[in-house]
Image: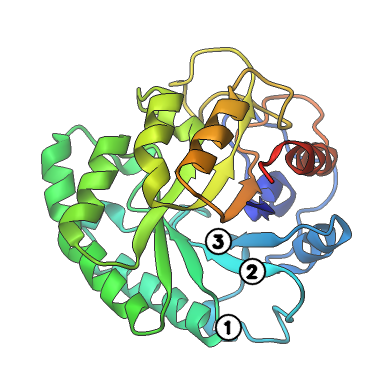
């Protein structure tokens, strides 16, 4: 397994506030990858996944913007920030979301990425319709996206993004029937939708291409925004069993630190990321 970071960990520094968070005293970063790349390089991590909402338009990205290095770089597409952006594939309701995803697939191909995280929706876009209807509507858009990515030897790793339970996500992938589809496993998003973290990990592990790993404080996991994150190894999540389950499924991809809800008060997310990277180095299976 590889040590990685997902740039959502820096969301407050880019100016995005989740419920209950306070803005940092400093001015928000410009929507460019430079500070994240610099921090990741200083920690000598293996992989860095960049949230596309914090980047310039995909057509503007090239080897100057994202220079080649020892880092495995990928895109994390589908977060609905700032206001007006798509919630991933918008639950299969939006041709415009498909078109935007195709633009990012083209950029990933141009930069020779191997895997890209995508989302199908979000908790805010989920609605109240039966899951069977949502799943059925997603098959076509997911299949078309996979076909576009497959032309460039790019794998799409669909995140359980608070919109679908583990079994429902697997149904989408199986019914879409494309070999370049897999999973981005978010262990805390499992419990946000009522899945058991360990059982959900067991179900998704065989199809997992990428992991966004979180730890969290005690508390009700279904609150808006999800439970408050801690640095890895400092919360109550059973991360050792999650990693052991992934190892048993022969997962050998990036395990990325991801910080989501950070609660109120003063927060030093750079220090939290650094402690989390150190924990991963101590804890990942060899």
Disc 3: which residue: 53
Whether label 1 touches label 2, CB < 8 Å: yes
For the question of whether residue 184 can be seen, the reply is yes
Q: Residue 174 occupies which quadrant of the picture?
A: bottom left
Residue drawn at x 60%, y 28% as measured from the top left = 239
Tell me the crowding category of disc 2: few under 14, some 14 to 19, or many 20 or more residues within 10 angstroms, Cα based: many
Residue drawn at x 32%, y 43% as measured from the top left = 125
Specify whether 258 is left or right of 179: right
x, y percent for residue 78: 44, 57
SS category of the residue bearing label 2? strand
> CA gap, disc 1 to disc 2?
9 Å
When the figure is inspected, residue 248 is found, relative to residue 13, above or below; the finding is above
Q: Which mark is residue 73?
A: 2
x, y percent for residue 184: 45, 50
Mark 3 or mark 2, whichever is nearer to me = 2
Residue drawn at x 49%, y 39% as measured from the top left = 248
Residue closest to the eye, 8 or 194? 194
Tell me the crowding category of disc 1: few under 14, some 14 to 19, or many 20 or more residues within 10 angstroms, Cα based: some
Mark 3 or mark 1, whichever is nearer to me = 1
Q: Residue 89 occupies which quadrant of the picture?
A: bottom left
Counting residues from the N terminus, which is met first, the one under dot 3 or under dot 2? 3
Q: Which mark is residue 111?
A: 1
Specify whether 134 is left or right of 187: left
Specify whether 268 is left or right of 188: right
x, y percent for residue 22: 72, 32
SS category of the residue bearing label 1? loop
> CA gap, disc 3 to disc 2?
16 Å
SS category of the residue bearing label 3? helix
């Amino acid at each position: 397994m590889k040590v990685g970071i997902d740039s959502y960990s820096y969301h407050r520094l880019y100016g995005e506030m989740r419920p209950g968070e306070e803005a940092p005293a400093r001015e928000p970063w410009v929507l460019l990858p430079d500070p994240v790349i610099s921090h990741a390089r200083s920690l000598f991590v293996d992989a860095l996944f960049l949230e596309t909402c914090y980047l310039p338009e995909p057509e503007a990205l090239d080897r100057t913007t994202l220079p080649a290095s020892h880092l495995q770089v990928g895109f994390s597409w589908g977060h609905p920030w700032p206001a007006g952006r798509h919630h991933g594939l918008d639950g299969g309701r939006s041709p415009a979301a498909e078109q935007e995803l195709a633009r990012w697939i083209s950029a990933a191909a141009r930069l020779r990425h191997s895997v890209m995280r995508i989302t199908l929706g979000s908790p805010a876009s989920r609605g109240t319709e039966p899951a069977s209807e949502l799943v059925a509507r997603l098959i076509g858009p997911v299949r078309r996206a996979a076909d576009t990515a497959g032309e460039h030897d790019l794998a799409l790793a669909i995140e359980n993004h608070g919109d679908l339970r583990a079994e429902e996500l697997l149904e989408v992938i199986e019914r879409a029937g494309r070999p370049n589809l897999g999973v981005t496993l978010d262990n805390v998003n499992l419990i946000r939708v009522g899945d058991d973290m360990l059982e959900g990990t067991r179900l998704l592990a065989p199809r997992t291409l990428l992991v966004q790993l979180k730890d969290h404080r005690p508390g009700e996991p279904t609150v808006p925004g999800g439970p408050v994150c801690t640095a890895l190894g400092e919360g109550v999540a059973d991360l050792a069993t999650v990693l052991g389950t992934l190892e048993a499924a022969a997962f050998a991809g990036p395990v990325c630190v991801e910080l989501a809800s950070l609660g109120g008060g003063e927060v030093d997310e750079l220090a939290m990321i650094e402690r989390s990277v150190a924990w991963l180095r101590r804890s990942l299976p060899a």
